[in-house]
Amino acid sequence: MTYCVGIKLNAGLVFLSDSRTNAGVDNISTFRKMIVYEKPGDRFMVLLSAGNLSISQSVREILQVEHLKETETSDPITIWNATSMFDACRVLGQAVRHVYDRDAKALQASGVEFNVNLVFGGQIRGEGMRLFQVYSAGNFIEATAETPYFQIGEYKYGKPVLDRVLTPDTDLDEAAKCALVSMDSTMKSNLSVGPPLDLVVYEANRFETDKIVCIDMQNPYFRMLHSGWGQKLREVFDSLDDPVWDESHTDIPLRTEASGRSKPLKKITRPEEKLI
Amino acid sequence: MTYCVGIKLNAGLVFLSDSRTNAGVDNISTFRKMIVYEKPGDRFMVLLSAGNLSISQSVREILQVEHLKETETSDPITIWNATSMFDACRVLGQAVRHVYDRDAKALQASGVEFNVNLVFGGQIRGEGMRLFQVYSAGNFIEATAETPYFQIGEYKYGKPVLDRVLTPDTDLDEAAKCALVSMDSTMKSNLSVGPPLDLVVYEANRFETDKIVCIDMQNPYFRMLHSGWGQKLREVFDSLDDPVWDESHTDIPLRTEASGRSKPLKKITRPEEKLI
């Protein structure tokens, strides 16, 4: 499996990916799932990939030479000369479709679904930052202020903390911390998501970054986050009152039947009784 | 969808279920997913169900009359006279198989998978408490001290807090709180899991319980848990240090390249460069 997250904030972009792939549970390998495309001063783009590894590797390979032509005579558009992230993402979508044309039929004959999911974000000089999620059909959606992030792969375990923390105003370091907590929760629950992690933080309007780091399990910051989060979650849990079953002893009674709002569950106490 | 959890502790059992069912997102209904079977002084059993509602309702219906016969002449075993929870669970497994025999072929013809998941636990006089998870094939597994709980339905969002809190020594009220926090996380992330909630707490060797409550969103305890957990999680998150990118200013540097353990990601800066 895989877990990747891309976040778009007013202050910049954050990308985080794991690097575990698996075919079943008995064949686990390490593959990096992030690529950074950078032309300093002109464009900065990051691609995260999940799904079938042979497909995502092929997409990454041909993306370097892929191009769109609006008309027969117009100049080809590539990710390196596109004037908008939207156009660059269209080039990526076309790369996905080329791999589909080449491989999907043979994959289907082997019972393998054509499955690839991509997050693609960055900034090209002349416009603001943009973040996209690209599907297996080469179509894509763009992140907005209401949903400032995209996840691909094993997204469920790590989603709650993103929802609680991220808004467009979140600062970059806080968002990076949030992505790492999200990854930590995911790795705790799904063995097929694993280190090392690749983290990239991009500041708006820089068109380059040096905040690129590979984090392994010896990384002191990640270790602090891992143990601190687990321990403090437990403290929070303990600090919340336990339920009390006798209404007379508490301001927070568990029962609400008294108000008539909810009907208690019926018990079946004899074989001939039925609930349904 | 559905989310149900059953927990087996030394002190007793805890069961919690939501009550939302859906066919797509445009057809949402309320169905209770918990049934309590109680013969005071003799046996106390709870059944939680997830999966196809027509299947689980049929299983519940015929469970009342289902019986096993070890030999042609032996007395029939039902959930009401079984001398062990293991035998009662075999009766339940057989009920699932009867519904399979009756419905699976027609469902398959309509492209519907035969899908039902059950949690079944309780205590019959003469043995300790037991907790089982029953699959669509009518086979089942039993909870042990290492994994003292079973979840069915949308299990991922609510699993981390169970893993962090539950051990066989956890007390009953704390486990009930843990189940409710787990449910709260699930309802926050999956619209197809929803109130009212049914909660049952059973104390070991009582063979009955009056701790049965239906919790709606006006329940003051659940409201306290919902807002308290969200707010305190955020405080914990804020209390953890943000990453610092300059090693000279922190004891918890984010970078680990200096140690040579992890290889940083390579950037692609020219069209002709390749990473793979």
Image (cartoon, coloured by chain):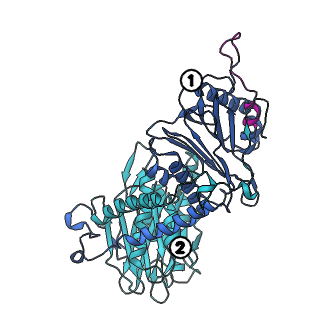
Chain colours: A blue, B cyan
Q: Residues in magenta?
A: A58-75
Q: Nearer the viewer, mark 2 or mark 1?
A: 1
Count of numbered circles on the image = 2
Assign a secondary structure to mark 1: loop
The magenta stretch spans residue A60? yes
Q: Main secondary structure of the magenta part?
A: loop
Q: Amino acid at mark 1?
A: Gly
**Residue A164 percent across, percent down from the top left:** 44, 52
- Mark 1 — residue? A126
Q: Read off the residue under disc 2.
A: B132
Task: From the top left corner, tell me how far across and down residue A2 is, in percent.
Answer: 65, 51
Query: What residue is at 35 percent from the left and 64 percent from the top?
Result: B225
- Magenta highlight on residue A1: no
Q: Is residue A184 above or below residue A129?
A: below
Mark 1 chain:
A
Q: Which mark is residue B151?
A: none
Classify B49 as above or below B191.
below
